[in-house]
Structures are given as structure tokens and as C-alpha cells.
Image: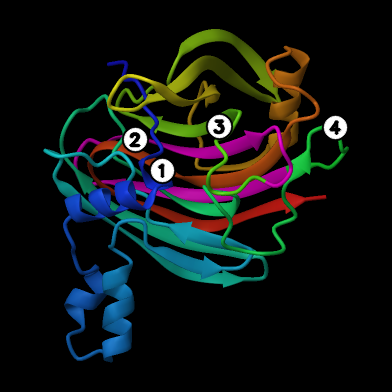
């Protein structure tokens, strides 16, 4: 089954964030449920990890329990927990259970480096102008548990702007997704352009566009979406994100004067129950 990834920016405004938060049930994490005698602060922290759009700081990263795709009629929950951050390596897990349309994304719990409708951390080494000569790479090792057949991916989400200092109100110019793993028919937005080899890995490149409209049908924002989908799944990889970006530059799909403003990594869940466990993750900007 081929499904289509749909993206929205519902979390970009406080009103939308509140609406989505109210639509998401609150569930104590397994840790909080099992240890009723734990200190109140620990119980509160565990409970917060299941709140919509809860963030956990791990400078220069932060974890975002992003549930942007939850709409009325969707049932489920998601909890994102920090396991450790030491030696520059980040580890976290996300437990999820979503029902509803198998063709629409419910959530993208992720580690964020840089911009995400604003900035939360300093010293991210971002933005990076694409013609600056700097190289951005990432190491990621993870495991997937499926308690029920789950339509999902494990992917990077990179954001690009035409300006070097975007704030919360500045919409992106481009979005580049990098799918390392996909399950049960999950598919990207857009149409397949070609298959290419970058960094010794074969990728299917899809090209699409996000168009957001208000209630009257007026276009409020839009951006291009480029999705690299591995032709074979993996659970560990060192990814040259600059090389993937350069391939888009070579095809004149992006401009060398654009800025990479954010690197995110997580799981897009369409439907199902399971867990993503990241045992080691890092991004290097040099």
C-alpha cells in the first residue's frame, strides 16, 4: 500500500498548539505508572513527557513530543523520554499508539537541532549557508518495536530558509526529508523523480510541495519538499547530509545562497502501536 505523507504547521501558532494539545489524551509513561512512590517531581516529569509538544532540553539539542497531525476523531497517545546525553551522543525513546487514517501522519517526535518555528537552544552551529563549505553529517543508531503493524518511518527532517536569522513567523523555503527506514507501506509526499546514489547509498528522490490555506482558501504559506527514501531499510547509518543537499543544488532545486536552519530526527507515525528507541545520535557541523 502506498500512503502519502501530509505536512502541516499547526504548531506554528499558539492557538493551533493549544487545540492539538487538547485533542491529545494524557497518559502517564510506564515509568510513572509503575512507581507510584516516586517523588512528585519525577512523576510530574514523566507525565509531562506525554504532553503534546512537550520539550526536553539536551543542549544543543532538544526533544519535541510533536503531535502536529492529531485532528478531531484521531485517538491515541505518545510519550518521548530522554534516556541519556553524554559524550556528545543523545539517546531517547518514543512510545506511540495511534489510530485513524493510514495515509496521514499523526506525529513526528524528534530531536531538534536549530530552528523549529523559533529557537530554543544556543550554540547549535546553525544556520549554515549552503555555499559556505561547511559539512553537516550525522550518526544514528536506533531500533523499532511494533506491537501492532505500524505505518511509520524513521527519518531526518531538514529545514531551509532564504534568510540567515529566521524566527517563529518565518516560513521555510524548502524541506528535505531523509528516510532511513519505512514500514508497512509508508510513503512520502510528491512524485518520484529518480533513483540516485549518494554516499554509497541508493535513494529514491521524491519532489512535492506543501501549500497551507486559511479557512477562506487563501494561501498562507508554501514550501518545496524533497524526500530521499532509502531503497533498503537500515537501523544504523552515518549520513552525509551536505552531500544530499548538494545533489539538490546540482539539480537546481535549491540555491547555494539558501541556509540550512535545522536538522531534526525522529519517527513519523501514521497509525499503529510501537516504540522507537535511539541508542546513539549526533550531528556534526564543521
Is residue 108 depicted above or below 193 in this figure?
below
How many C-alpha atoms fall within 10 Å of the one at disc 1: few (<14), some, or many (≥20)?
many
**In this picture, residue 233 sits left or right of residue 119:** left
Checking the image for residue 178, the label placed there is 3
Reading the image, the residue beneath label 1 is: 267
Label 3: element kind: strand
Circle number at residue 152:
2
Q: What residue is drawn where x is 61% and y is 20%?
A: 202
- Packing grade of label 3 (10 A; few <14, some 14-19, many >=20) is many
Q: Say the numbered circle drawn on residue 133.
A: none
- Give how far across and how far down residue 130 sits, in percent: 79, 33
Which quadrant, please, contains the N terminus?
top left
Which callout, 2 or 4, points at the residue further toward the start of the chain? 4
Question: Can residue 199 be seen at all in this image of the molecule?
Answer: no
Q: Secondary structure at mark 4?
A: loop
Q: Which residue is mark 4?
A: 131
Amino acid at each position: 500500500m502506498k500512503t502519502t505523507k501530509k505536512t502541516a504547521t499547526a504548531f506554528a501558532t499558539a492557538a493551533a498548539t493549544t487545540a492539538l494539545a487538547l485533542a491529545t489524551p494524557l497518559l502517564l509513561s510506564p515509568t510513572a505508572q509503575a512507581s507510584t512512590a516516586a517523588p512528585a517531581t519525577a512523576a510530574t516529569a514523566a507525565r509531562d513527557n506525554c504532553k503534546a509538544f512537550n520539550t526536553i532540553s539536551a543542549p544543543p539539542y532538544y526533544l519535541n513530543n510533536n503531535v502536529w497531525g492529531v485532528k478531531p476523531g484521531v485517538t491515541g497517545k505518545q510519550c518521548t523520554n530522554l534516556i541519556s546525553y553524554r559524550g556528545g551522543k543523545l539517546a531517547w525513546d518514543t512510545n506511540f499508539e495511534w489510530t485513524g487514517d493510514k495515509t496521514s501522519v499523526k506525529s513526528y517526535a524528534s530531536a531538534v537541532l536549530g530552528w523549529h518555528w523559533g529557537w530554543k537552544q544556543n550554540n547549535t552551529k546553525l544556520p549554515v549557508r549552503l555555499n559556505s563549505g561547511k559539512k553537516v553529517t550525522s550518526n544514528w543508531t536506533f531500533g523499532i518495536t511494533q506491537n501492532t503493524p505500524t505505518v511509520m518511518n524513521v527519518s531526518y527532517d531538514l529545514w531551509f530558509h532564504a534568510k540567515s536569522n529566521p524566527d517563529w513567523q518565518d516560513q521555510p523555503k524548502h524541506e528535505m526529508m531523509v528516510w532511513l527506514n519505512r514500514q508497512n507501506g509508508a510513503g512520502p509526499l510528491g512524485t518520484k523523480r529518480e533513483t540516485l546514489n549518494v554516499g554509497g547509498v541508493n535513494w529514491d528522490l521524491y519532489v512535492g510541495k506543501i501549500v497551507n490555506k486559511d479557512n477562506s482558501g487563501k494561501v498562507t504559506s508554501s514550501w518545496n519538499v524533497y524526500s530521499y527514501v532509502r531503497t533498503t531499510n537500515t537501523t544504523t547509518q552515518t549520513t552525509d547530509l551536505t552531500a544530499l543537499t548538494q545533489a539538490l543544488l546540482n539539480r537546481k532545486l535549491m540555491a547555494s545562497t539558501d541556509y540550512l536552519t535545522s536538522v531534526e530526527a525522529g519517527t513519523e507515525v501514521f497509525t499503529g502501536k510501537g516504540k522507537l528507541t535511539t541508542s546513539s545520535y549526533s550531528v556534526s557541523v564543521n
